[in-house]
Amino acid sequence: MPIVVTLDLMLARRKMKAKDLAAFVGITESNLSLLRTGKVRGVRFETLAKICDALDCQPGDILEFVAEEPDAALEGDPS
């Protein structure tokens, strides 16, 4: 997936526990864990805004776009 969640990094920078963030945002710890590991298909803007408020950051500080490398087989590269 080209979107990488770097929430753990921001939690460490802010010295905040995931448990405390979940309580502030109003979501379960298990849902926050799914978000932290990138196992969710989407996130509500309201939830993202609360996370950014709690961590005093911008959405780009916790979400990163990483372009996928083109598949060599699709380009006709025999190697």
Image (cartoon, rainbow, N blue to C red):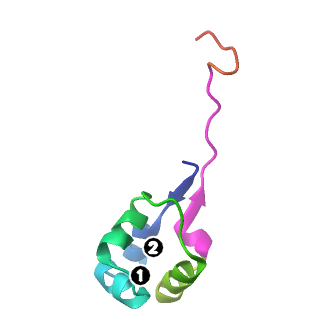
Which portion, as a residue range, is magenta?
59-72
- As helix, strand or loop, the secondary structure at mark 2 comes to helix
From the image, which quarter does the C terminus lie in?
top right
- Residue 47, percent from left and from top: 51, 80
One can see residue 74 in this view: yes
Residue 67 to residue 8: above or below: above
Residue at horizontal 66 percent and vertical 14 percent from the top: 77
In the image, residue 50 lies in the stretch drawn in magenta: no
In the image, residue 67 lies in the stretch drawn in magenta: yes
Q: Number of labelled discs?
A: 2
- Residue 71 lies in what quarter of the image? top right
Q: Is residue 17 left or right of residue 2?
A: left
Residue at horizontal 42 percent and vertical 66 percent from the top: 35
1 and 2 marks in contact (CB < 8 Å): yes
Amino acid at the residue labelled 1? Arg
- Residue ID for mark 2: 10
One can see residue 56 in this view: no
